Amino acid sequence: MSRNDNTGLGLASLFVIGVLAIMSVGVNEATEFEDTITVEKTWSKMQCNGKGQCHEKYLVRATSGEVFQITDSLYRAQFRSSDIWSDMDPGETFKIKGDGYRFGCTSSYRRIYSVENI
């Protein structure tokens, strides 16, 4: 087996990764929104995989009943999700910017990446 036998597999892998990255950016851009919400409740939800690796979801429910998630975003260079979430107190009103969609089967929520207290 020569050293170049895996070149095709490597190029195919890079192609697939590139397509997935472009699709991810497209979903973010296509689903951007701005809204004004009043916070009803905030809470966090711990999610763990079978290997004991866990991460925390920061969730906010608006008085309209919709639940949003606040997450860090490499695409938007926003890495302050816990700071944003901790500043959102029940009863306060915010102008929010976000993206994404709600898909209950995977517990995914529309994401908030920017807030302004009004």
Image (tube, rainbow, N blue to C red):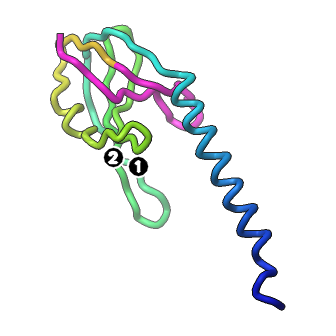
Q: Position of residue 36 (x, y in %)?
A: 31, 9
Observer-nearest of 86 and 45 = 86
Relative side of 111 to 88, left or right: right
Q: Is residue 79 above or below residue 92?
A: below
Q: Residue at x 50, y 27 (%)?
A: 100
* Mark 2 residue type: Glu
* Mark 1 residue type: Gln
Quarter residue 81 falls in: top left
Circles 1 and 2 in contact, beta carbons < 8 Å: yes
Observer-nearest of 112 and 16 = 16
Mark 1 and mark 2: Cα distance apart in space:
6 Å
**SS of the residue under disc 2:** strand
Q: Name the residue carrying label 2.
A: 56
Q: Residue at x 38, y 31 (%)?
A: 69
Q: Which residues, given as a range, are shown in magenta? A: 97-118
Q: Residue at x 32, y 15 (%)?
A: 62
Label 2 crowding class (10 Å Cα cut-off): few <14, some 14-19, many 20+? few
Q: Residue at x 19, y 37 (%)?
A: 83
Q: Name the residue carrying label 1.
A: 47
Q: Is residue 104 above or below residue 45?
A: above
**Mark sitting earlier along the chain (1/2):** 1
- Quadrant that contains the N terminus: bottom right
Q: Is residue 98 magenta?
A: yes
**SS of the residue under disc 1:** strand
Quarter residue 11 falls in: bottom right
Label 1 crowding class (10 Å Cα cut-off): few <14, some 14-19, many 20+? few
